[in-house]
Amino acid sequence: MSHKVRRSNIELSVTAIAPLTPPGLSSPMTQQPILITGGTGKVGTRIVSHLRRKDVAVRAGSRSGTPRFDWTDQHTWDAALHGSRTVFIVPHDGELLTRPFVQRAKDLGVERIVLLSGRGVDVPGYAGDNSAAGKTHIDGEDAVRSCGLAWTILRPGWFAQNFSEGFFRDEVLAGEVRLPAGDGAVSFVDAEDIAAVAVAALTEDGHEGQTYELSGPRALSIAEALALISEATGRMVRYVPLTVEEFIIQLEDEGWPKIDAQAYADAIAPIRRGMDEHLSDGVQRALGRPPRDFARFVTDAAAAGAWLD
């Protein structure tokens, strides 16, 4: 999964706001746009692109969008939701905001919700007891399942794009990826597949009430994944296994707060314990085709210049 680590002390309560036409939007609307929260993220940008290619009206929800959408500012929610009947939710990790957002969406006439959750939500011991992201996903899934609307839940594993767009990229460019992952393997899922499943669930019938566990077609160790990147790019990248203690000290030396360093280490722990190597059938079930292989991701990313300095 993306495993974003966030810290926030902000607490919000949602108050009823009359669903008037918000500033910046014309009325009546000639189309009902699909709202994609996290519309500028790894998955969100791909969903937006897919929908636009299909000539489907779409609204990319983000703090820089028009209208603006900010998870931590409830006053932006109505404008983003206005006129939408279908919503894709990328939760705000570390905050229990999915439930009030789903309720507000329902109040404003949304009929279908697709939620991006994460692998291991229902697996005992997968996330640490203090995992903020885990609590967000558990509460968010319950909110969606019990909301009374049509819903679909996506549970992807680790994104392949973490090597090309995410927090592994700088280490790939530096030639070393240093993690407390042991020799554990991961069935990395391509964000293109996550987006394709999301688009199907947002625009087609037959996905209501489904929970799609998403992975790639095979599991690779970190060393094996980096070997494929090295081969495709001609850039030698090696895996350096660390102990948890070494990893946390390294992050603290880089300026990370200890609580964030520990959270990152906890996110890596399932790999080390062999809990991320299993294969899931969600892509096949949702799309009727096998998932994209990690090697194909590497080839496409290298061709696109993902690892150029």
Image (cartoon, rainbow, N blue to C red):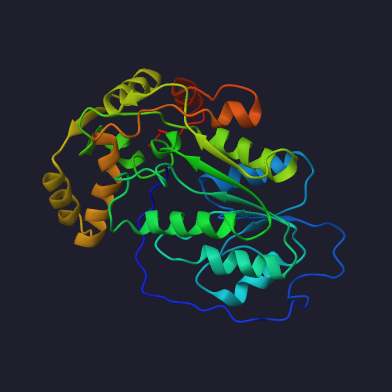
Query: Which residue occupies 67% across, 72% down?
Result: 78
Percent position of residue 164, x then y? 42, 36
In depth, the one of 94 and 79 nearer the eye is 94
Count how many numbered circles sit on residues in the image. Answer: 0
Examine the rendered structure and indicate whether residue 106 appears above or below residue 237.
Answer: below
Percent position of residue 247, x then y? 17, 46
- The quarter of the picture where the C terminus appears is top left
Q: Quadrant of residue 181?
A: top left
Query: Which residue occupies 76% across, 56% down?
Result: 33
Query: Which residue occupies 32% across, 48% down?
Result: 127
- The quarter of the picture where the N terminus appears is top left
Percent position of residue 139, x then y? 47, 59
Q: Quadrant of residue 53?
A: top right
- Position of residue 152 in the picture relative to residue 203 (left or right): left
Q: Quadrant of residue 14?
A: bottom right
- Position of residue 253 in the picture relative to residue 136 (left or right): left
Considering every residue shown, the one lying at the far top of the view is 231
- Position of residue 179 in the picture relative to residue 230 (left or right): left
Examine the rendered structure and indicate whether residue 265 appears above or below residue 149.
Answer: above
Q: Is residue 68 visible?
A: no
Q: Is residue 131 visible?
A: yes
Examine the rendered structure and indicate whether residue 35 appears above or below residue 239.
Answer: below
Percent position of residue 144, x then y? 58, 56
In depth, the one of 258 and 123 nearer the eye is 123
